Image (spheres, grey):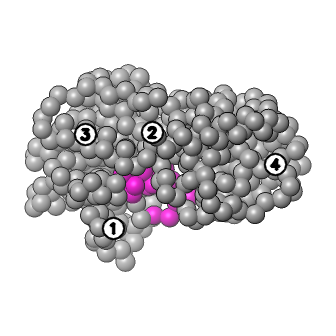
Amino acid sequence: MRISLVSEHASPLAAIGGVDAGGQNVHVAALATALAERGHEVTVHTRRTDRREPERVAMRPGVTVEHVPAGPPVPLPKDDLYPHMAEFAAHLARGWARRRPDVVHGHFWMSGMAALEAARDLRVPVAQTFHALGAVKRRWQGPADTSPPERVAVERRVGRQADAVIATCSDEVAELRAMGVPGDHIFVVPCGVDLDLFRPDGPSAPRGPRARVLAIGRMVARKGLDTVVQAIRHVPEAELVIAGGGPDDAEVLRLCELVSVYGLTGRVTFTGSVGRTEVPQLMRSADVLVTVPWYEPFGIVPLEAMACGVPVVASAVGGHLDTVAGCGLLVPPRRPRALARALKDLLARPGLRESLRGAGARRARTRYSWPRVAARTESVYESLVCGRPGRLAVAEG
């Protein structure tokens, strides 16, 4: 098949760790690669952010990244991209009219809007993955939500008009149905993990004698890193390593202030952004990885830690209910004392840690390899290309 993936703000070529560069970038890059390895021709369409970027880049055999001219060719926060989506869609439509894809897959709500507009007159089937839902974001962030005011209405329209909506976890299905997405158009296909990179064996980063708690991810408030800092006050036997962002990031500065206020200097370390190939070494150096966002559409970081054989403590939200439940510890979000109790219990029980290491690695290996995820995604595409009616495909496990 000739497959077009639309990812307006999340380029598969981007460095990971910025405010708008995280799990979606990893997902799109890995999915494109795995689909190409299955013999498909894949093009990823993402917005041009630099005049020097070539129009097309061969990312790897079978995968091309197209930089779409839409808005000024400079980096912009994703929440500022909505006014440029008509230009984005018009460019896609012109290109697809010359070389029609067999199927289009939008990633994020604005990509879905552009994909549907561009594919409309060509009768190309469109699948959609939201990665995060505006209604959920607004529920948790309230006035702090910086999304365009049109987001929720546009998401509802995209969900209803797409030929298939691919949810990344079973928890998302109820949200999609509440938006009016037909149940027989919803398929649950999880994100995957690179099992060649993230594995239990291999070198570990240097560490001291203290038990090590690791938190890694984008430096944004909803990731709940302040909860981790507050919790570590009550776990005096442990150090906390926070990886991601840079020294001038607003969230890092806020967390540094908390560390100072709580007298944790010396027990909390900020590494800054870590290269992706170095992440497994850092993970394997930890006794436990903690990730407690307020909400999480999927959550790749805990899955990567599980693949490395690292025990995980995660908030009981979103995708964690599929991935971590049963082979890690779940705690309520924004509850520092509950998190502290879970960490103290886990650090005090080496047998439990060893059990969780094995269970997490097995789950990652058997359910979340990218070849498996690509095959399940391919089956959704095939059902659209062949015109077969959809059906709800519930996530495994």
Compared with residue 258, is residue 174 higher up or lower down, i.e. above or below? above
At a point 58% along the width and 29% down the height, the residue shown is 325
Look at label 1 and name its amino acid. Answer: Arg
Q: Quick one: label 1, few (<14), some, or many (20+) residues within 10 Å?
A: few
Label 3: element kind: helix
Q: Quick one: label 3, few (<14), some, or many (20+) residues within 10 Å?
A: few
Cα–Cα gap, marks 1 and 2: 25 Å
The residue indicated by pointer 2 is 367
Cα–Cα gap, marks 3 and 1: 23 Å
Label 4: element kind: strand
Q: Earlier in the sequence, mark 1 or mark 4?
A: 1
Q: Quick one: label 2, few (<14), some, or many (20+) residues within 10 Å?
A: some
Horizontal and vertical percent for residue 89? 23, 53
At a point 18% along the width and 38% down the height, the residue shown is 384
The residue indicated by pointer 1 is 60
Label 1: element kind: strand
* Residue 379: mark in rendering: 3
Q: Would you say 90 lies left or right of 33 here?
A: left
Can residue 332 be seen from the camera position used here? yes
Compared with residue 315, is residue 253 higher up or lower down, i.e. above or below? below
Determine which quarter of the picture holds residue 97. bottom left
Q: Looking at this view, is 330 or 338 the one in front? A: 330
Tell me where the magenta segment starts and ends, as one range.
14-31
Q: Earlier in the sequence, mark 3 or mark 4?
A: 4
Look at label 2 and name its amino acid. Answer: Arg
Cα–Cα gap, marks 1 and 4: 40 Å
The residue indicated by pointer 4 is 211
Q: Earlier in the sequence, mark 1 or mark 2?
A: 1
